[in-house]
Amino acid sequence: MATAAAAARALLLLIAVAGALLRPAAAEIKQESFKEDSRASILFEKFGFSRRGFVSIAITGARTSSKLAKAEPDQFGFFLLSDEALFEAIYEQPPPTDLNPNPEPNPGCVLSSPYVKPLFSFADLDGNGNYKKTFPVTQPDEYSLFFANCAPETAVTMEVRTDMYNTNLDGSKDYLSVGQAPVPAIYAFFTVCYLVFLAVWLYVTLYRNRLSAHRIHHLMSGLLAARMLYCISAAEDQHYIRIAGTPHGWDVMFYLFQLVKGVILFAVIALIGTGWSFLKPFLQDKEKKVLMVVIPLQVAANIAAAVVGETGPFLQGWVTWNQIFLLVDVACCCAVLFPVVWSMRSLRESSKTDGKAARTLAKLTLFRQFYVVVIGYLYFTRIIVYALKTITNYKYRWVSVAAEEVATVAFYLFMFYMFRPAERNQYFALDEDEEEAAELALREEEFEL
């Protein structure tokens, strides 16, 4: 009995880890097939319910196969679990002793835990292994939908369709989690912001300072266009999921433009770091190698992100795809910093021989600022935003989306302003009188990382 209780505690801990990895998102209508699946628990979705929430589950062709004795049907079932109840179950579950044996009939099964909200078990299925029912959720909270298999050495085959939604006052369904409801409007707002941003940038590069514009500036125009299209597709994707439960094809556009804007962003950061087109017309071999590494890594990261986003934690290997995405994304973030470091070192060395101390000091200042801001942006969007998704109350999960978009706009404004096309850039066109002061500054201040 002690072993069974310990197994239950371990299972709850695994559920906690899976729940932490799962980002709360739109509860699209999901239909998945499982064949000879022997996992002890399967996490389907995580969703924030209002007082008028519902969970609809339909199962067809459910059957079990065991290497041991035939398992009881009440050892298989679906349940809801809130995060608060999950951690209470982990930390407050008393260990069984001989003096105080566990009175539960099946102490090793999470379905018998007082902390979960059981929906139904296989004992409720009809003779063909089918079942369909909609369950009301009257207690507002964020719940995770799980399937539990408490029979050892037993595999399950079934087809499952899940709908999780809230209802509005007019009776219509809202398939977005409570904390995700403002997300379509947020993306729509930033679509307008990027449209204005792009119009101003095109005016600067194609008309006002056309003669000073370089190829990198036109690539930056492409970045703004890709980011705008990404926001449009994200807004439409979330809108259609909200009203219909399916993205109506906008998910394809979403992942496409997510890939495009990611590749262009990292390419722009790397090329600006090398000084390509506005400081020098060519790339060195090591700089080309960075691009040859970053671009395929971004493609791999976005493929992993698409798999994670479109399948869900019920996919075997879903955690592995999550780890691939995180690892590749971190590798990209590190790789794009190398060109900036190389440029700073090259400028530092050239300042000793070219006799242009003031101009070199200005370039070093610019690249150091760019290096610090890039690190800050990558840290914020990878660490702080993830922390906001994890620790923010489920009713305010939209805050992480807004924070990421605000940080991105701020980073773009800095980068585009600092590297804007200009006939007499404040960093690169300095008076000769400043040379002596700049030489002294270069000797006294080390531009080391």
Image (cartoon, rainbow, N blue to C red):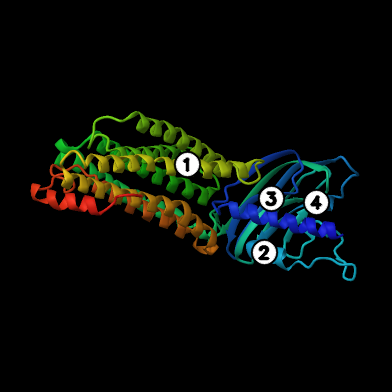
> Which x, y percent locates residue 230?
40, 43
CA gap between label 2 and label 4 equals: 20 Å
Labelled disc at residue 331:
1
Which is nearer the N-term, disc 3 or disc 1? 3
Q: Determine if residue 234 is in view.
A: yes
Q: Residues within 10 Å of mark 1 (few under 14, many from 20)?
A: some
Question: Which structural element holds mark 2?
Answer: helix
Identify the residue at the far bottom of this view. Answer: 99
73 horizontally vs 296: left or right: right
Q: Pointer 2: what residue?
A: 87
**Which three-letter amino acid code belongs to the residue tagged 1?**
Ala
> Which element is circle 1 on?
helix
Nearer to us: label 2 or label 1: 1
Q: CA distance from mark 3 to mark 4?
A: 20 Å
The Cα–Cα distance between marks 2 and 1, rounded to whole angstroms, is 33 Å
> Is residue 114 or residue 250 the one in the foreground?
114
Going by the numbered disc 2, the residue's amino acid type is: Phe
Q: Nearer the viewer, residue 21 or 271?
A: 271
What is the crowding at mark 2: few (fewer than 14 residues within 10 Å), some, or many (at least 20)? some
Please tell me which of labels 4 and 1 falls first in the chain.
Answer: 4
Residue at image point 51% right, 51% down: 242
226 to the left or right of 19: left
From what the image shows, is residue 65 above or below residue 42? above
Return the x and y of residue 171 as percentages of the image width and height: 56, 59
Name the residue tied to disc 3: 57
Q: CA distance from mark 3 to mark 2?
A: 26 Å
Query: Residue at horizontal 90%, vertical 71%?
Result: 99
Residue at x 87%, y 40% (from the top left corner):
67
* Quadrant (top left/top right/bottom left/bottom right) for the N terminus: bottom right
Q: Reading the chain from its start, which is encountered first: label 3 or label 2?
A: 3
Question: Mark 4 to mark 1: distance in Å?
Answer: 40 Å
What mark, if any, has residue 150 been given in the picture? 4
